[in-house]
Amino acid sequence: MVKYKVEKAEGVMYQCQTRWLSFKSTEGFFHFWVSSVVISVWEVVARILTGGDIINYNEVVKISDAYLLPLVSELYGLEGYEIKLVKAHDGGRNVVYTCVKEGIDAKILRIAFINDRSREDFLGELEYVRYLFEHGGSVSDVVNSLKGNLLEERTYDNHTFFICLFKKAMGKMLVENNYRYREGVPITEYYYNCGKVLGNLHQISKGYTPVHRRYSFFDKYNAEYINELIPDSLCLLKEKLVQLFKTLEELDRNRESFGMIHYDYNDGNYSIDFDNGQITIYDFDNSCYCWYMFDLASLWTNGVGWIQFEPDAGKRKKFMDDYFITALAGYRSETEIANSMLDKLPLFIQVNLMESVVDAFEVMRNNDEEPECGEELSFLIKCLEDDIPYMGFFHEMYSCEEPFEYEKRNI
């Protein structure tokens, strides 16, 4: 998951679940420019257990330069492409490159080096992306190697690297356009399209039968894993998460409510063609079998950044209601969702918070860091421990001056 550190600027700050951006307002509500973005530099320590060795991100980049990139050029016919390293982000699990050649569609190269996923996991992801693309999903398609493979695997110095190539999505991310939408077009078109493209993916998923099956929600998220990952000092949090799992276990898992989902749906994982508003989704790294409502709850949380500095909780609530009505209309233009499942939106927002908390502790573990609980993580934990709904966005604990922050905890 992406994280940005910011210098707070005059005007408005936008926040979604995975990034913070500062920018000054010009005219009106929807026109912004980025004032300051500082991407945190990370040094991920990946635990590659083969032979007990440890390999870090920078070492993988060196191996790529010396060994993998020449090999990849041959595997995928990338001779003549300019291959550039994409800056890494906190919590990232891959080394990523852009591949550009004049007159030819750009590509994205991904090299995975952390052993948290098996070959079957990668194949499950890539086969799903290919299925979505072939059935009309607005996703960045996988590019086969010259051998006809979706996935290539290479070993160097006892370390295994999983390699895949994708078509680069048309357009650019919102952040790359300074969080300005299409000139002369209401922002509500964007809200609607966010729901529509997600609904289309879910509709296609309802007909998907995998060859290599990705993991299901409870394969990862269960009491045993939570107890192992989260410090014992957070005993109330552990208790609440176990209760959350028990509630989820009682829900239907039929084909209309449960299937393959993106599981990380936010504006850092899709691009917008600003000529026509078309959204193209990518980064299915976390895709798994889960309730479709999880992605819909992510869609809800993605809206809070547009209104987070409003001091009046009633106005924040009104904005979020209108935003989600529009996004849901887009979603329902492509697929159905039962009202009985929509009623569980607060539950699945809590599940989104749970995933963010788990991800934060996983990043600390993978970076070989001592667990700590800063203001942002403390806010998420407070919402979960005290059963505060809707990310605390309408609760008295919320501060529009320090959005989504709570006093740091010692753990």
Image (cartoon, rainbow, N blue to C red):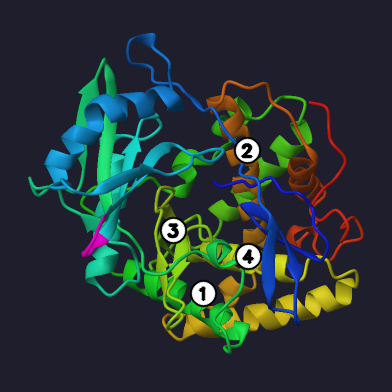
Q: Is residue 199 visible?
A: yes
* Precedes in sequence: disc 4 or disc 1: 1
Residue that label 3 marks: 262
At 48% from the left and 42% from the top, the residue drawn is 87
Residue 208 lies, in percent from the top left, at 28, 64
Q: Are marks 2 and 4 in contact (CB under 8 Å)?
A: no
Residue that label 2 marks: 360
Q: CA distance from mark 3 to mark 4?
A: 14 Å
Q: Residues within 10 Å of mark 4 (few under 14, many from 20)?
A: many
Residue that label 4 marks: 302
Between 275 and 196, the residue placed more toward the observer is 275
Q: Are marks 3 and 2 in contact (CB under 8 Å)?
A: no
Give the label, 3 or 4, closer to the camera: 4
* Precedes in sequence: disc 2 or disc 4: 4
Q: Which residues are magenta?
A: 101-105
Q: Residues within 10 Å of mark 1 (few under 14, many from 20)?
A: many
Please, what is the three-letter code of the amino acid marked with disc 2? Answer: Ala
Q: Which mark is residue 194?
A: 1
Please, what is the three-letter code of the amino acid marked with disc 1? Answer: Cys
Indicate whether residue 381 is drawn in magenta: no
Q: Which mark is residue 290?
A: none
Q: Is residue 280 above or below residue 122?
A: below
* Precedes in sequence: disc 3 or disc 4: 3
- Secondary structure beneath dot 4 equals loop
At 24% from the left and 54% from the top, the residue drawn is 127
